[in-house]
Amino acid sequence: MNETVVTFFSGSHPYQVVTELLTRYLGFNATGLLTVVTFFVACFVIVNVMALVGGLGTYAERKISADMQMRQGPNRVGPFGILQFLADGVKMIMKEDIVPKDSDKMIFFIAPILCMAGVFATLAVLPFSSGFTLTHLNIGVFYLLGVSSVVGVGIFLGGYSSNSKWSMIGGMRGASQIISYEVPVTLSIIAMVLLGGGLNFKDIVGAQGGLPHQWFIFHNPFTVISFIVFFIGALAETNRAPFDLPEAESELVSGYHTEFTGMRFAFFALAEYVEVFVLCGVAVALYLGGYQVPFELSDTFLLHNKIGLPLGPARILGQLLEVGGFVSKTCALYYVVIWIRWTLPRLRVDQLMTLCWKYLTPIALINLVGVAFWVYYFDGESMWNLIFKSGAAAAGGH
Amino acid sequence: MFDNFLFISSAALTVCGALAVVLSPNLMHACTYLLTSLIGVSGLYVTLSADFLAATQLVVYVGGVVILMLFAIMLTGGNDNKSVNKFGIEKIAPMGNIKTFTLAGLSALLMALVISKIIVNVTKAVPKGELPPFSSTVEKIGELLITDHVLAFEISSVLLLGALIGAALIARPRKIES
Amino acid sequence: MSAYNLNVYMPVVILVAIAIVMVVGALLVGKLLRPHNPTALKEQAYECGEEPVGSAWSNFNVRFYVVSLVFIIFDVEGALMLPVAVVFRKFQGIGNGAVVLGSFLLFIGILVSGIVYCWRKGDLDWVKSFTLNSYNEDRDQIAESKTA
């Protein structure tokens, strides 16, 4: 069985005690029940954390943009305005729900659900740490690609169902942009899968190390380019500036969610912010060492035997260290995403498509071939190893 | 228990989605229902422990083919309420003659025979035994693709090349004939 | 616990269920809180204050269709390449790397030839009809037809 949150916890003593107690009390084997409950609690926690991340994302976006433009940004609600997103949420829920008369009511209702479901389903494989990941599916990365493509359909249907010209154009652009940029992203991912030797995030992250020279981004010259291609593609897939053509406010009012009010709009926005976080997380897992902590500090063996922590806390502490590593790297990338948004001007539609099909896709293909050759010739060793070895040989070492 | 739940829910999604596609008078709604049906099929693959196939189903069909269909609908101007036509009887004149109908009937019969052959096999009692371990199917597929079925692997590339050029050809603007 | 275990997919189902419940629940809860007094003006589609003319569901350019068609082809390519990429290092380990690399490169090569063809023929251009050459050709043709 693949590793999941449940297999992580079921190894611990309290979990087994609870299972035993429940089995005795309920009169049947409580393993299955407890599995469902654990999964549910874990999912619930992660969804809430992600909703918080989405909310804080809007806050961070406004605050960072204000910082870049020498403004104050939100500063009224709570200390430094940090509770602004809660006030916004309350406002959203109090807003009147307006459904345009000519709209397609059913699809109008379904579109936000598709966006939310698509984004939330990706959280199942997002590798926060080796133990706290909801589930390490065998098809990890590929599953993530497939599920996140539902978001594109949601955006298109959102634009279509409004029966407004702005929304329609935004939806068409959004869907075509998302599917176009999926091509270079997929090709970059294939290159990383070649290096990692598995679709499972555990394999890919496990093939990397905690220190920067062990990350896949610095594995060889091709992977650096691959990371840049992936990152640009991820920006475009999440409709972030400079690729926010589907919601270009200067030409399309608000794009595919022009007609969505109140909570319906809030769900589109939440889905977008969470998706940015997820894709930053994927970039971290694929290129930046994922949840690996330098010097194997998170190793249970080290914490348990050398430092002398009891086994349970040692495991939890190790996992928390890994979560910290993952989240801090992801937040750094998140900052870069926002930074790019407030730095670069928006592309034109034809420039967008030219960039995808004439630059990124060929570059990604060449990269893929390059990585394949690297794995073949140097047996998958990173360039630092090669440099070190040749240096050692030149110095006459053994 | 979860296996059964997964199977029943994805089977229900597939069947209900497919039925809704057929019964829906609205083209766009039909496409949306098709989405649920395809997701259901992917769930069925998961219950068969064909996890890579399930993901492929999601990536190619949900992410690609459904969007292709949506764009194809928009190519014809979306779902205009005037053109709603539940069975298409008034609009489309009967295409074909006795020869084509006979041919269609025969091929339908052939397909029915093949399907019944499959059903016979499925309903036959299978000896109870150990189910194969739920390991990564991706590696097996990859191994087979470059050992036994390497020809199919390469030929599929040629097929896709043909499709790519075909797609480019039909979209090319026509030269003005003078 | 048998090795054949679908429990690993449980979070997926739970997460999708949570997403659906969240959207539906928020809309239902909001129904108790929010005002509801629609007017004909509110329910119009927003077109910067103008009365909307006609439906937005109009014919769209064929280029969107072509992009999605090309995307599907690349998607299938990706789906076929992924399993090979997964086992590449394992075959490399047993000394079979060259053969696998060869078939992999052949696969990519055929794909690249398709892209090169499309590129040369100008099918990757988003704006096809407004290139200066074709514009000039069209103008010449129109001028010719007028003089004729």
Image (cartoon, rainbow, N blue to C red):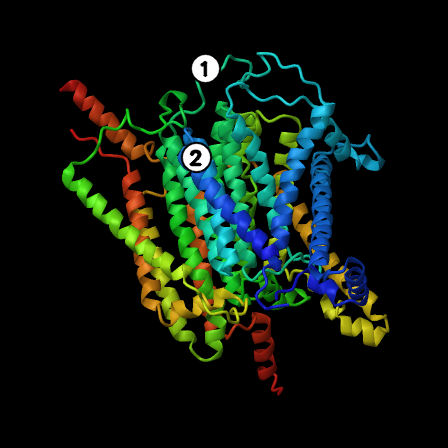
Residue A200 vs residue A106, the one in the foreground: A106
Residue A322 image position (x, y, % from top left): 73, 61
Q: CA distance from mark 1 to mark 2?
A: 27 Å
Quarter of the image with the N terminus of chain B in it: bottom right
| C52 left or right of C25 in image | left
One can see residue A176 in this view: no
Instruction: Give the structural element (helix, strand or loop) at label 1.
Output: loop
- The residue tagged 1 is C53
Q: In the rendered image of this protein, does residue A39 appear above or below residue A220? A: above
Numbered circle sitting on residue A239: none
Residue A345 image position (x, y, % from top left): 56, 36
Quarter of the image with the C terminus of chain B in it: top left
Label 2 environment density (alpha carbons within 10 Å; few <14, some 14–19, many ≥20): some
Label 1 environment density (alpha carbons within 10 Å; few <14, some 14–19, many ≥20): few
| C110 left or right of A324 in image | left
| A164 left or right of A34 in image | left
Where residue A109 sits, quadrant-wise, is top right
Seen at 55% across and 20% down, the residue is: A100
Seen at 22% across and 23% down, the residue is: C142
Label 1 is placed on what type of residue?
Val
Instruction: Give the structural element (helix, strand or loop) at label 2.
Output: helix
Chain for mark 1?
C
Residue B113 vs residue C26, the one in the foreground: B113
Label 2 is placed on what type of residue?
Ala
Residue A215 vs residue A388, the one in the foreground: A215
Residue A203 image position (x, y, % from top left): 59, 66
- The residue tagged 2 is B30
Seen at 50% across and 19% down, the residue is: A102
Same chain, marks 1 and 2? no
